């Protein structure tokens, strides 16, 4: 599927998350092994069961009354478009594909109280953010719960490959709100202490928020305007466990299917993969099953592939999670540096891969695979590769 | 040469018919599904009309009993099961890697609204864990994947009025690229007070700016839409897979397009394939949007191609609207007819609106969806 004619490249990235605003804040925090999870401030924490979160800063410049989701998208979008140095018609004609769990739930809550705020539904959020960024091409919203980011980037890639779009601002977002937090706490999947991927003591995830956006375009379009590719988006895959809405399947088969589909889409064998950025939520079943799934895909070589779990630092930023992790993959491909899994000091015997514990590691990575899974049993995997020459 | 995507099953839940035969017959004879709004009191909004599916019960369409289904999911399950039965495909078939994609604008509003009410009433710590999993945008897609063992490509689109047709595009793309031999795909939108109130606040609902409440696509004196509900689902497969199992092909997906505006999407889909013999427009009675779309149609297919718009009979069903129009087009291709627009004067110059009793025998039809709730348009050309 991947040949010179439909090669899709990344030419800009933007991020906002609990490590700060901007890709630089994200990357420097990750390689330093800094945890961005902290006290829940956006809400009255005493009203909630879980009082810490991966809360992102609200960016400067947005007016009050603008939902945090729209603010995150505006900040990350402006950064990505800026890095890609897009202006004029090329910028204006950029298609938008955003992935999210909840859209702007703060605004949806106001709708429930009888108001009619702007951007109350997920589809409207994309339109609102696109308008703020000065984009007037098509705006698509995908909701694959916590697998949304990768799925949106993948669909954006499909639009480019099939000639429906020249360039796409693609990624994911979500924002903490009263109802989102009440709902997530009600699922009883969060840890009251820390997010410890693959650790024996892991007892849940800790949700967060933010936005991660990639400006992707056909290699030909990038070349034509003299843009420098940061990395290649090689392929993606989605799947469903088709098993249960909130419990994972017994053997991680859904995650295996997504990884294999992504590699098929990328026309790459498993042997080509140098690094896996894991979904690694820190819940007892996920990390064990994802480990098993990685072994199923890569066989004996799995033990030699560096696998990291960045939610130990980012929290689980929901729809933004896999998009932020995709940005980390691009940085890893470029910098030859793999950010660590922090808080992993007592590995679970069932989790016996090389998780790059505690400290970042130098390694030449040509192909990275980025995993995500979400509520409802859906999975998405993205394959990113270094731009060669 | 990429494989062709074909439709082998179609299921419909619409205000004027349950099942695609009843739906097709209602459209053919011009039977409206619009009536008095019954599910809540909208008198404070000055609106009395809606396209609700009254006394709907999903039970006959459920393979296993369910303790609870949001109305959105229930409508989807009914339409999906009808499509699966018609296709003759044997599901569940976990190991085959077949997939599912769904489009909806507002998602599972019934569950979300109930969850929000409980949080407001009892506080976040007493939030009911049972409701929240039913309140996600992707709840319906997840439930369908479990029901039918659809472990392959998985999509959930929320791009307003285009969402359902985008889900169909996702499925066609999955089949064409060889990601799955077969997909279940469609759109759903349940009628809900909160969605209705939002639609009124956005100025989409008739009468916006005076006059009587009505939904008259492309009509003179149109003043907004009437909100309806429904679902339409399809089994979409590669032609080879359908032939191999001896399935009857209802139609072929000959071309697809997405774009930001009506003008762009009609032009884009026509660049991909031969001109269609009929157009099923997205028009829903909006003063501005219908005029823009009418202009786009005239520019794309000229003034002689018959144009119809089914929303006059069922209302604006947002995420379900594209798939319902696709189901209407299938009925027309199969039955050799085009459903008429609601009677009335056409306000768009040079548009050949289908009148009652039109007896053509179209071999192809263009179906468009878009409009409220996002900035995306989608179009599909179906060929017999």
Image (spheres, rainbow, N blue to C red):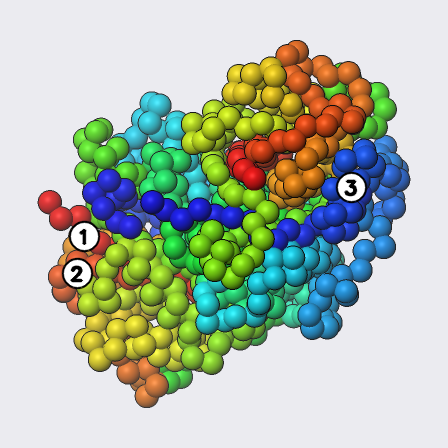
Circle 1/circle 2 CB separation < 8 Å: yes
Circle 3/circle 1 CB separation < 8 Å: no
Q: CA distance from mark 3 to mark 2?
A: 60 Å
Q: Residue furthest top?
A: B349
The residue wearing badge 1 is A386
Q: Earlier in the sequence, mark 1 or mark 2?
A: 2
The C terminus of chain A sits in image quarter: top left
Q: Nearer the viewer, residue A245 or A15?
A: A245
Q: Mark 2: which secondary structure?
A: loop
State the residue at coordinates (35%, 29%): A91
Q: Is residue B23 visible?
A: yes
Chain hosting mark 3 = B
Q: Is residue B235 left or right of residue B206?
A: left
Would you identify the image quadrant in which residue A115 lies?
Answer: top right
Q: CA distance from mark 1 to mark 2?
A: 8 Å
Would you identify the image quadrant in which residue B240 lies?
Answer: bottom left
Q: Is residue B70 visible?
A: no
State the residue at coordinates (74%, 20%): B219
> Is disc 2 on the same chain as disc 3?
no
The residue wearing badge 2 is A365
The residue wearing badge 3 is B25
Q: Vertical placement of B228 versus B306: above or below? A: below
Which labelled disc corresponds to residue B26?
A: none
Q: State which mark lies toward you, 3 or 2.
A: 3
Q: State which mark lies toward you, 3 or 1.
A: 3
């Amino acid at each position: 599927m991947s040949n010179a004619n439909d090669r899709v490249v990344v030419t800009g990235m933007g991020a906002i998350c609990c490590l700060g605003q901007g890709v630089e804040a994200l990357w420097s925090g990750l390689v330093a092994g800094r945890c961005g999870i902290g006290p829940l401030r956006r809400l009255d924490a005493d009203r909630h069961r879980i009082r810490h979160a991966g809360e992102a800063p609200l960016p400067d410049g947005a007016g009050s009354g603008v939902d945090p989701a729209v603010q995150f998208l505006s900040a990350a979008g402006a950064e990505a478009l800026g890095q890609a140095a897009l202006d004029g018609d090329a910028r204006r004609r950029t298609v938008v594909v955003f992935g999210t769990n909840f859209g702007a739930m703060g605004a949806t809550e106001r709708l429930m109280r009888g108001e009619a705020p702007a951007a109350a539904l997920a589809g409207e959020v994309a339109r609102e953010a696109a308008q703020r960024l000065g984009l007037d091409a098509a705006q698509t919203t995908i909701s694959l719960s916590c697998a949304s980011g990768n799925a949106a980037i993948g669909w954006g890639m499909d639009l480019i490959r099939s000639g429906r779009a020249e360039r796409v601002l693609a990624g994911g977002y979500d924002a903490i709100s009263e109802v989102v937090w009440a709902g997530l706490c009600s699922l009883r999947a969060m840890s009251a202490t820390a997010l410890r991927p693959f650790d024996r003591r892991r007892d849940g995830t800790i949700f967060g928020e933010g936005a991660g956006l990639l400006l992707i375009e056909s290699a030909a379009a990038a070349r034509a305007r003299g843009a420098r590719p940061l990395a290649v988006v090689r392929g993606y895959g989605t799947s469903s466990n088709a098993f249960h809405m909130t419990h994972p399947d017994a053997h991680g088969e859904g995650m295996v299917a997504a990884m294999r589909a992504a590699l098929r889409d990328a026309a790459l064998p498993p042997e080509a993969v140098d690094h896996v950025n894991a979904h690694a939520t820190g819940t007892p079943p996920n990390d064990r099953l994802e480990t098993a799934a990685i072994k199923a895909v890569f066989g004996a070589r799995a033990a030699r592939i560096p696998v990291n779990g960045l939610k130990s630092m980012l929290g689980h930023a929901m729809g933004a999670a896999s998009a932020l992790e995709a940005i980390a993959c691009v940085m890893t491909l470029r910098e030859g540096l793999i950010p660590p899994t922090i808080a992993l000091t007592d590995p679970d015997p069932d989790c016996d891969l090389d998780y790059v514990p505690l400290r970042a590691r130098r390694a030449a990575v040509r192909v990275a695979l980025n995993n995500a899974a979400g509520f409802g049993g859906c999975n998405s995997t993205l394959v990113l590769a270094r731009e060669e020459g | 040469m990429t494989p062709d995507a074909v439709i082998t099953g179609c299921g419909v839940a619409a205000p004027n018919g349950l099942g695609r035969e009843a739906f097709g017959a209602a459209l053919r004879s011009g039977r409206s599904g619009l009536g008095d709004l019954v599910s809540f009191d909208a008198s404070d909004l000055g609106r009395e009309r809606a396209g609700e599916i009254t006394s709907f019960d999903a039970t006959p369409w459920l393979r296993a009993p369910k303790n609870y289904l949001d109305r959105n999911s229930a409508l989807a399950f009914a339409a999906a099961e009808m499509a699966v039965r018609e296709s003759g495909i044997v599901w569940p078939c976990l190991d085959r890697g077949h997939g599912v994609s769904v489009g909806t604008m507002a998602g599972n509003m019934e569950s979300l609204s109930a969850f929000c009410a409980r949080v407001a009433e009892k506080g976040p710590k007493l939030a009911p864990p049972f409701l929240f999993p039913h309140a996600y945008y992707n709840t319906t897609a997840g439930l369908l994947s479990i029901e039918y063992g659809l472990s392959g490509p998985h999509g959930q689109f929320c791009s307003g009025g285009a969402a359902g047709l985008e889900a169909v595009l996702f499925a066609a793309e999955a089949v064409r690229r060889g990601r799955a031999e077969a997909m279940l795909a469609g759109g759903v939108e349940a009628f809900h007070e909160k969605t209705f109130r939002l639609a009124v606040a956005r100025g989409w609902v008739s009468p916006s700016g005076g006059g009587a409440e009505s939904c008259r696509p492309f009509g003179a004196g149109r003043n907004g839409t009437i909100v309806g509900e429904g679902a339409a689902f399809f089994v979409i497969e590669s032609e080879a897979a359908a032939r191999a199992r001896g399935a009857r092909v209802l139609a072929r997906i000959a071309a697809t397009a997405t774009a930001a505006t009506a003008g762009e999407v009609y032009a884009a889909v026509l660049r991909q394939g031969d001109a269609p013999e009929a157009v099923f427009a997205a028009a829903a009675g909006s003063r501005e949007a219908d005029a823009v779309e009418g202009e786009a149609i005239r520019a794309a297919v000229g003034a002689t191609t018959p144009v119809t718009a089914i929303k006059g009979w069922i209302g604006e069903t947002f995420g379900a609207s594209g798939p319902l129009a696709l189901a209407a087009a299938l009925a027309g291709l199969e039955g050799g007819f085009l459903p008429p627009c609601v009677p009335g004067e056409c306000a768009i110059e040079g548009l050949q609106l289908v009148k009652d009793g039109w007896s053509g025998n179209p071999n192809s039809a263009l179906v468009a969806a878009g409009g409220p709730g996002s900035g995306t348009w989608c179009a599909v050309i179906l060929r017999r």
